[in-house]
Amino acid sequence: MTELVEPATPASAALPRWCDRCGGSVAGGPHQACAAARALEPPRWCAHCRRRMKVQVVPTGWSAVCVEHGEIRG
């Protein structure tokens, strides 16, 4: 019997390279102000490819869509 197995991805691919609030490099320094603001607002930039995301805010939450990496909700 065979089963579908997802391809292995390198550990570095799973780590975000960009700040999802300001779009700056995570390696460039701490983003404490961004982390504090993200507690109250949705992400604006994709953390994996640095594309600007389409964000929709509704009374029950938010959704952000990257054309490359899909949708996240909060």
Image: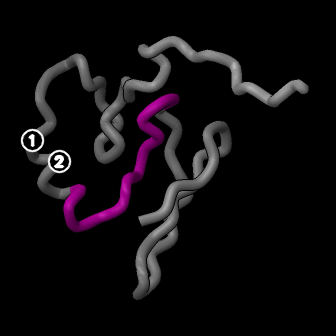
For the residue marked with disc 2, what is the amino acid?
Ala
Position of 56 relative to 66 (above/below): below
Circle 1: is it few (<14), some (14-19), or many (20+) Cα within 10 Å?
few
Q: Secondary structure at mark 2?
A: helix
Residue closest to the far right: 1
- Quadrant for the C terminus in the image: bottom left
Q: Which residue is mark 1?
A: 32
The answer for how far apart the CA atoms under marks 2 and 1 are is: 5 Å
Across and down, in percent, residue 26 comes to 26, 25
- Quadrant for the N terminus in the image: top right
Residue at (74% x, 25% y) in the render = 5
Across and down, in percent, residue 15 comes to 38, 25
Magenta stretch in the rendered image? 38-49
CB under 8 Å between discs 2 and 1? yes
Position of 24 relative to 37 (above/below): above
Q: Quadrant of residue 37?
A: bottom left
Residue at (70% x, 26% y) in the render = 6
Q: Which mark is residue 35?
A: 2
Q: Secondary structure at mark 1?
A: helix
Is residue 48 found inside the magenta-colored segment of the image?
yes
Q: Quadrant of residue 25?
A: top left
Q: Which SS does the magenta portion mostly show?
A: loop
